Amino acid sequence: FVFAAAMRADIKRNPFHPFSTFDTATLAGLAYGHTVLAQACKIAGIPFSNKQAHSAAYDAEKTADLFCGIVNRWKELGGFPPPAVMDTPEEDNA
C-alpha cells in the first residue's frame, strides 16, 4: 500500500522498491519498544478498543494508523540522514 500511495501522490522519486515490505510490529518495537498492536497504539497516542480488536478490518486500520504515525514521526526520531550538501563551485574573487 505504501508504493500505491506514493503513486497516487504522484511522487516522482519514490524511495521504495515495488516489492518492498514493512513489518509494522518490528517498526513499533523500534519506535515505541512494544510489538503488540494495542500497546504500541497506546504509546503512540492512537485510540485502541480491545472490544473491536482482532477483527480483520479493525486491526488492519489500526496497523495502518500505527505505520503512518511511525513513518510521519521518523525524522523526529532521527531516522532520516541530514540532506546532502551539494558541492558548489567557489566564487571567483579575482
Image: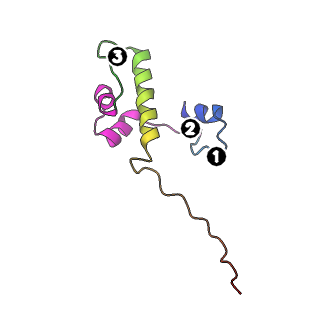
- Residue topped by disc 2: 19
In which quadrant is the C terminus drawn? bottom right
The residue indicated by pointer 1 is 13
Cβ–Cβ under 8 Å for marks 3 and 2: no
In this rendering, position of residue 17 left or right of residue 94: left
Q: Residue at x 29, y 16 (%)?
A: 50
Q: Is residue 81 left or right of residue 87?
A: left
- Place of residue 23 in the rendered image (x, y in percent of width and height, measured from the top left): 42, 35
9 left or right, relative to 55: right
Mark closer to the observer (3, 2): 3
SS at circle 3: loop
Magenta stretch encompasses residue 27: yes
Asked if disc 3 and disc 1 are in contact, CB closer than 8 Å, the reply is no
Alpha-carbon distance for marks 3 and 2? 27 Å
**In the image, residue 58 above or below residue 44:** above
Q: x%, y% of residue 64?
A: 45, 27
Please state the total of marks drawn on the protein image: 3
3D distance between C-alphas at marks 1 and 2: 16 Å
The scheme the figure's colours follow is rainbow
Q: Mark 2 and mark 1 in contact (Cβ < 8 Å)?
A: no
Q: Residue at x 58, y 42 (%)?
A: 17
Label 1 or label 2, whichever lies nearer to me, is 1
Q: Which mark is residue 78?
A: none
Task: Name which of mark 1 and mark 2 comes first in the sequence.
Answer: 1
Tell me which amino acid carries mark 2. Answer: Phe
> Which residue appears farthest toward the front when viewing the image?
93
Which range is magenta? 18-44
Spatial CA distance of label 3 from label 1 is 36 Å
Q: Which residue is mark 3?
A: 54
